[in-house]
Image (tube, helix red, strand yellow):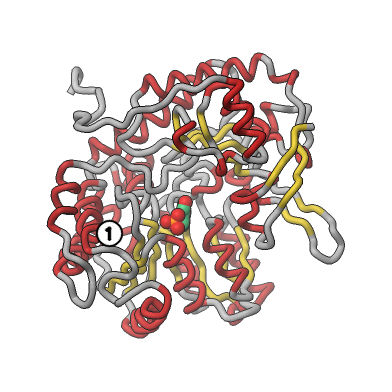
Amino acid sequence: MKYQTAEPFRIKMIEHVKKTTISERQTWLKEAGYNVFKVKAENVYIDCLTDSGTSAMSKNQWAALMMGDESYASCDSFFRLEKSVHEVFDMPFVQPVHQGRAADYLIAKIYCKPGQIAIGNMHFDTFRGNAEVLGAKVADLVIQAGKDASSAPEDFKGNMDIQACEDFILKNGPENIGLIMMTVTCNNNGGQPVSMKNIRETAALAQKYNIPFTMDIARIAENAYFIKTREAEFKHASISSIIRQTLSYCETAVMSAKKDGLVNIGGLFLTRKQDIFTMANQLAIVHEGFITYGGLAGRDLDALAVGLREVCDFDYLEYRIKQVEYLGNKLKEAGIPIIEPTGGHGVYVDARRFFTHIPQNEFPAQRLVVALYELSGIRCVELGACAFGTTDPVTGESHWPELETMRIAISRRVYTNNHMDCIANALKDIYLNRASYKGLKLTYEGPIQSLRHFTAGFELI
Ligand SMILES: Cc1ncc(COP(=O)(O)O)c(C=O)c1O
């Protein structure tokens, strides 16, 4: 193994990327209202906006894709996917959906009545958005270290604060809690993992108060890698067995397959309960498609069936997590503040410590996103004042989140460490010049606050 430390794959097909100039990028930024979601992807040099739906598929996935049926009732592709789900997740009932947020809708609709609260370690935006639209409320009860981008390194910063969770249940009444959802890994605070111990304790707490325990498993394989490498009990366990054990504690799980499914589109709603499955089927027929395809083409189901098995490969996961760590180490060497340790799918730069002179109401993390695209053509995403901040509709008062980060999301099997070096070099130069940057003014926000970063508009101050 000593000499076999490179990426565990050969690059079989390439996509050309365009080099652009600073002045071109300044024009595009202005046209986009300083929101890089609106910059054309063809004008991006290295795209770290998201790790979702951006994986390079393997030759086996492309071959499976060609085997796929046109989808409708009981197509063969579905049964191949179902077999793979049974094998990898050991969950009996599978409702495919077109992507993760559709599964978020199903779970929020089935479990949360208007006025009820969904407890999570840290809910992802699309669950939060769906819950809000349906009249439910959400509470994030991740441990304190998981809320603070400058906290000392800890192995499992995605863990639920068990005491806070029990206090919250008692204060609000168990009958008012729709579900407890554990998101693994925890996207919004650095792709930080959750330990098996914490999953067990949270599930036990949910059981004590008769509250359904559910999971968001978009990055369950990355979480399993961290469990294997950081939790002594699992040192010799296979990734597949860790994944199955993780899921054994929950009754229902949702997955955006665009992450650890290694596909470009797709999602899953998985459950152990026949009655929940029946409800999901009905809602899926209305919103997604028939029970056996859920808005996907048969070929997408086939590519996912293969991707779910491939993601359990330890060599792949080791390469994946170590590439993220490589970039994190480069940034740390340059003194750039990041969430430590690096998590599963990206490096999160702490914009509070990066631009200490830009106040949160001038969007320091978004300013960093804009600066990085302007200087280098590299696109990242803000997870801070814009994504998580809110304005009270009655009082007009602003609430600012604790985390103010720029996420550098790394696509799976797409970039090499040369690309990581480019990102580090550009950020180093911005960091050296950091005092010369001023903040941003928010000029537009959409009606659903938890989703405002997707469409917000800004001006340079
Ligand atoms: C943890 C988590 N859940 C759900 C979603 C939503 O998935 P999708 O983008 O497939 O709708 C995401 C997307 O980034 C996510 O990170």
The image quadrant where one finds the C terminus is top right
Residue 428 rendering spot, x and y as whole percentages: 57, 17
Report the front residue among 281 and 289.
289
301 shown above or below 458: below
20 shown above or below 187: above
- Per the image, the residue denoted by label 1 is 244
Q: Is residue 363 left or right of residue 96?
A: right
**Residue for point 74% across, 18% down:** 436
Examine the image and state in which quarter residue 359 appears.
Answer: top right
Examine the image and state in which quarter residue 227 appears.
Answer: top left
Residue 275 rendering spot, x and y as whole percentages: 36, 85
Residue 415 in sight here:
yes
Please identify the residue farthest to the right as the structure is shown: 395
Examine the image and state in which quarter residue 295 appears.
Answer: bottom left
Q: Amino acid at mark 1?
A: Arg
Residue 294 rendering spot, x and y as whole percentages: 33, 70
Q: Is residue 101 left or right of residue 53?
A: right
58 shown above or below 358: below
